[in-house]
Amino acid sequence: MTARPLKQRLFSRIEDARDDLVALTRDLIRIPTVNPPGDAYAACGAFIGRRLADSGFTVEYLRAEGGFGDSDRYPRTNVIARIEGSTPGVCVHFNSHIDVVAPGAGWSVDPFAAEVRDGRIYGRGACDMKGGLAASIVAAEALLAAWPEFPGAIEISGTVDEETGGYAGVAWLAERGYFSKPRVDYVIIPEPLNKDCVCLGHRGVWWAEIEVRGRIAHGSMPFLGTSAIRGMGAFLDRLERDLYPALNQRRTAMPVIPEGARFSTLNLNSIHGGLEEGSDGFPSALVADSCRLVLDRRYLIEESEGEVRREIVDLLEAVRAEQPEFRYELRDLWSVPPAMTDADSDLVRALDRGIEQVLGRRARHVASPGTYDQKHVQRVGHLKDCVAYGPGILDLAHQPDEYVGIDDMVQSAQVMAAATVDLLAGAGDAA
Ligand SMILES: [Zn+2]
């Protein structure tokens, strides 16, 4: 068999499956897998499992028992389906998270009715990422039908909790070898990064809490105490004068989108100071003895977590050098190092070729401002060949009136199928 007719047959099969792809996406949206708390995971997993079992896959349900967030009321159930080809070879894995964020206010349609209008499917999770999950399922099914003697293996997973860190989902599975060689060679995550973009990775994250400690005193005699809020104010002033201008100069070579996220960023997530008001809303006359600040620092692949932490400590120490009574504690809350797959890896090149073949234009390489499950595949599974590629517009994720375009889903399913053909056939261009 020659590969070119194979791809042409695949593309027309996927085009013919358009109605099925729409129906599948709508069915998935109608299962309201809202996280938190993690509703309807078992139902959604069973739905995906039944579909793939009917297509010849061997299906495993893996509940992260005792994992983060798992309970009998809200079981963290993941589904992994695998099908072996006619001869041994590499395994291509499509991983989608099944959870969606709460719909929130401002919808003009029912967020779980999956209405179709003007070539789009509307609903919570339409683009992030049930449209991508459905596209990967239809792509794999078309490949099995068009190429029954394919070599290697194909896997499709539906995993939980990506929106809350993925600890009972991809991280839990990766700890058990589900995202490592020799089981898996390539992982494609159909997150909504646009149908012509291959997402190579993401920036790093460091969350920390700073608590400035003061000394309590009567509010009418503040000179007898030490205000933690004024101490925090001095630190915030240092951030404005010294750190923000420096961060705005630091630009990464990674192709992060949007442009603003090419720079190092710092979000002051929250601040709490002084004693809480009583139930009547009336405050006590006190000097604040504590002020807490949560920092959300997103850092570049050119920076290290150690450097990022040290520059905060240096600023805190600079305040202390000026104000000897300034006392603070720094607590690390969470961190994820940056992740990036090589742009010239077989995986990226296979997707690049698929995009050219289907869309007739060059693929764009991008990186994500925030993290997603790729971090667990790389850090826990030690699998570098992992990227995000899927239909939908990233800006619509988590917004009211989220939608996914039907043409975009069809075309990205064709790209996924073409890339899978190349990866299964071998490193070279099978077309
Ligand atoms: Zn997502």
Image (cartoon, rainbow, N blue to C red):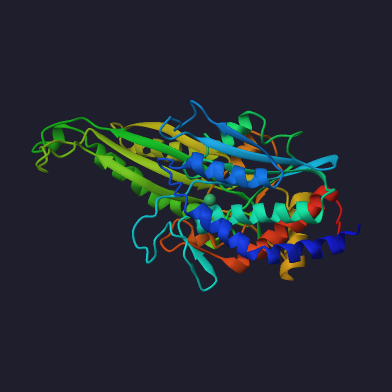
Q: Hey, which residue is sitting farthest top in the picture?
A: 66
- Residue at position x 53%, y 30% in the image: 64
Residue 237: tell me if it is visible: yes
Residue 83 place in picture, x, y as percent:
74, 41
* Residue 169 in view here: no
Counting labels gives: 0
* Residue 39, quarter of the rendered image: top left
**Residue 173 at what x, y percent from top left?**
60, 33
Which residue occupies the foreground of this view, 44 or 318? 44
Side (left or right) of 60 relative to 222: right
Residue 72 percent coordinates (x, y): 43, 30
Q: Nearer the viewer, residue 90 or 43?
A: 43
The quadrant of the picture occupied by the N terminus is bottom right
> Percent position (x, y) of residue 132?
60, 55
Task: Give the residue at the far bottom of this rendering.
Answer: 118
> What residue occupies the far right of the structure in this picture?
1
Query: Looking at the image, is 242 positioned above or below residue 217?
Result: below
Name the quadrant of the C terminus. Answer: bottom right
Q: Residue at x 62, y 66 (%)?
A: 408
Q: Is residue 310 left or right of residue 253?
A: left
Q: Nearer the viewer, residue 8 or 229?
A: 8
